[in-house]
Amino acid sequence: MTLGITAFREVNRRERANEAPVEYYKRAVEDRILDFEEVILGFDEEMAMAEAARCLQCPDPQPCTLNCPAGNDLPAALWHISQGEFLEAAKIFSQTSPLPEVCGRVCPNLCQEGCALSARNGAISIGKLEEFVADEARMAGLLKISVPEKKTGKHVAVVGSGPAGITVAEDLIKKGHQVTVYEAWPVPGGVLVYGIPSFKLDKQVVMLKIQDLEEAGVKFVTNTRIGEQITVDELLEQYDAVFLGTGAGVEANMSVPGEELNYVYSSTDFLIRANVPTDMLPAFRREKPWVGQRVAVIGGGDTAVDCARSAIRLGAEEVTIIYRRTEAEMPGNKSERDICLEEGVKIEYLQAPVEYIGDEDGRVKAMKVICMELGEPDRSGRRRPLPIEGSEFIQEVDTVVLAVGYWPDPLMGDTTPNLATHKWGLILADEEVGATSREGVFAAGDNVHGPDLVITAIAGAHKAADSIHAYLNKQPVQWVSAPND
Ligand code: SF4
């Protein structure tokens, strides 16, 4: 007899709390560092049911759901999985995200950090269970997008085809509007294709989503950079509304002498050339980055980890991440960091480069590094790194990758009259409704709040899509919060 969710909550609760986590399949290190294919293979049916059955079905408010930026009803999803009702679980994840198959793969699992079991035997692997049920739903054809037969006659331009653009496109096409998505790269997908490495997210997963959107009627225009080939004002002449979801793809700069040397790469350039198949790249980006034996990656976030893992796969023998604070202040995902250490990457804390030194041919051959100590917390709340005078030393390197942060492309603000932007090109927008300073122009995602999670961009884009729908129906869209609070 199958127990209902309420009865299940009370049965064998103590025993379930003591159950060991079910380990999902992962490729062996010696195998996976030879290619760029996905590392995590995930659960099979039996394993997924056993892992989900560990869930205690905590009373409301459940800490996992409170920690999830999308507010997913995770206990209900886990209950369905424990009963083998995978498609029912998939429907719950799809209620908040058009990309559950992506979120399951790349979400940093904030829900798991909140899980009541994390202090006992280990949190439930919610992200990998989401990936499992989303892939099941994909195979069952459940991720197809239904659209109304009757169209509204309204047409929206979406600029950018990353998580925010995909979300707005799907939400609006489902409401009967026509949608055209503009993408600067040769293939749609934005950061999902050109930022996140294939060993974390297979590009085919993204391509299947793009195919779903195309079948639902979304039109994609690639190799077109809005603000350069076409302005936002020109889009407003052709469309009833414009959504800006251009992300944050411009690299921050440390201005360290020697950054112009050969084989000192920006993380974007390095990741794109290393990870993206050449037929998805413009001709000038098709050459693989050169890595010597010793690679230094400067930075501490997920991008630094992605670059280090890519360098290992390109054949580097010694890959070191150089970070100016300690592990406690590191911004990235700990489980990603653990995987990267497993693959042989070293991390040096409390160090920062102060100069890159070149040889007579202009190639980097070493860097001068200074040791740091932590001072008082800065505005981010993290303790400020302070250089220790006289602690400099020389470290030989063959390749350097700079992964020190991202900001939006200022092009949009520079080429759109009266589109207000503020620090580092961020678009001034109400994060509750996505309204900008220009009527008919909406924005959400990393170009509004700076680099953040895929699920955060999705959450903001849902709100912007609701506002666009209201705007197209001549309902007022009012700013409800101070811009970019
Ligand atoms: Fe289940 Fe953990 Fe959420 Fe509790 S916090 S309901 S154990 S997933």
Image (cartoon, rainbow, N blue to C red):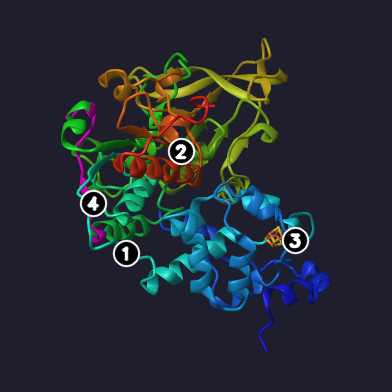
Q: Which residue is mark 1?
A: 146
Residue placed most toward the observer, 388 or 457:
457
Q: Which residue is mark 4?
A: 152
Please say whether residue 240 is one of the residues in the magenta stretch. Answer: no
| Distance between mark 3 and mark 2 Cα atoms | 53 Å
| Circle 4/circle 1 CB separation < 8 Å | no
Instruction: Tell me the magenta residue range.
Output: 215-232
Looking at the image, tell me whether mark 1 or mark 3 is earlier in sequence order: 3
Q: Amino acid at mark 1?
A: Ser
Q: Which mark is residue 163?
A: none
Residue drawn at x 48%, y 35% is 295
Q: Is residue 269 left or right of residue 389?
A: left
Residue at image coords 66%, 32%: 329
Local secondary structure at mark 2: loop
Residue of label 2: 293
Question: Residue 138: horizontal and vertical position, in percent?
Answer: 39, 68
Spatial separation of the CA atoms under disc 1 and disc 3:
35 Å
Which quadrant holds residue 165? top left
